[in-house]
Image: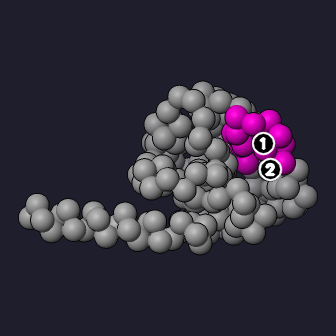
Amino acid sequence: MKRISVGIVDPHPVHAEGVRVFLSHNDRFNVVGIGHSTSDIATICARDRPDFLVTEIDMGGNPFQEILGISLSFPRIKTIVLTNTERKGDITQALAGRARGYVLKNRAKIDLIQAIDLALNDKIYLSPSIGNSVIEIISLSIKRNSIVH
C-alpha cells in the first residue's frame, strides 16, 4: 500500500516536530517536508507534492491565501488546518480556501488521522467543538441571503 505523504507547517518548531513524530508512529504516513512560515506552505507543496498539508493558520502573512492558492495550483493536495484558534472568521476563511479539515490542537491525537481519512474520501472534518460555530456561520449566511433576495 502506498504511504500517505504529508507536509507540515507550524511557526512553532516544537509543534511541527510533535505532529511529525505523531504521524511517523503510524506506518500509513510519510512526512516529506516541514516548514515554519506561511511562505513554506507553497514551497513544500511545490517541492514535495505531498498528499496532505497539515498547517497552522495563526502565523504571519496570509495563510488563507496560501491555502486557496494550493487548492487551485495543486488540487490533488488536501489541506488540514491544525490550530488553536476557534475564531469564526478563521474557520470561514479556511473552509472558503478549500481546507478539507479544521482540527483543534487540543484534539489532534483524536481528530487528525480521522480528518485525513475523511478527506481521502472527499469529506470535510471539523473538530466537534467548532461545529456550533460553523452552524452559526451558515445560519447567518442564509439569513443574509434571504434578506437580500
Q: Residue 45 is drawn in which quadrant?
A: top right
- Side (left or right) of 135 relative to 12: left
Q: Is residue 32 visible?
A: no
Badge 2: few (under 14), some or many (20 or more) residues near its Cα, within 10 Å? Answer: many
Look at the numbered discs 1 and 2 and tell me whether their residues touch, using CB distance below 8 Å.
yes
- Side (left or right) of 18 relative to 123: right
Q: Residue 113 is drawn in which quadrant?
A: bottom right
* Chain part drawn in magenta: 6-18
Badge 1: few (under 14), some or many (20 or more) residues near its Cα, within 10 Å? Answer: many
Q: Amino acid at mark 2?
A: Val
x, y percentage for residue 31?
Answer: 80, 46
Q: Answer above or below: position of 136 versus 60.
A: below
x, y percentage for residue 106?
Answer: 72, 60
Q: Does residue 147 belong to the magenta stretch? A: no
x, y percentage for residue 149?
Answer: 8, 64
Q: Is residue 26 visible?
A: yes
x, y percentage for residue 137?
Answer: 37, 63
Q: Answer above or below: position of 131 versus 60.
A: below
Going 80% across and 36% down the picture, which residue do you hit?
Answer: 13
Going 25% across and 68% down the picture, which residue do you hit?
Answer: 142
Mark 1 element type: helix
Q: Which mark is residue 16?
A: 1
Which color scheme does this rendered protein use?
one colour
Q: Which residue is mark 2?
A: 19
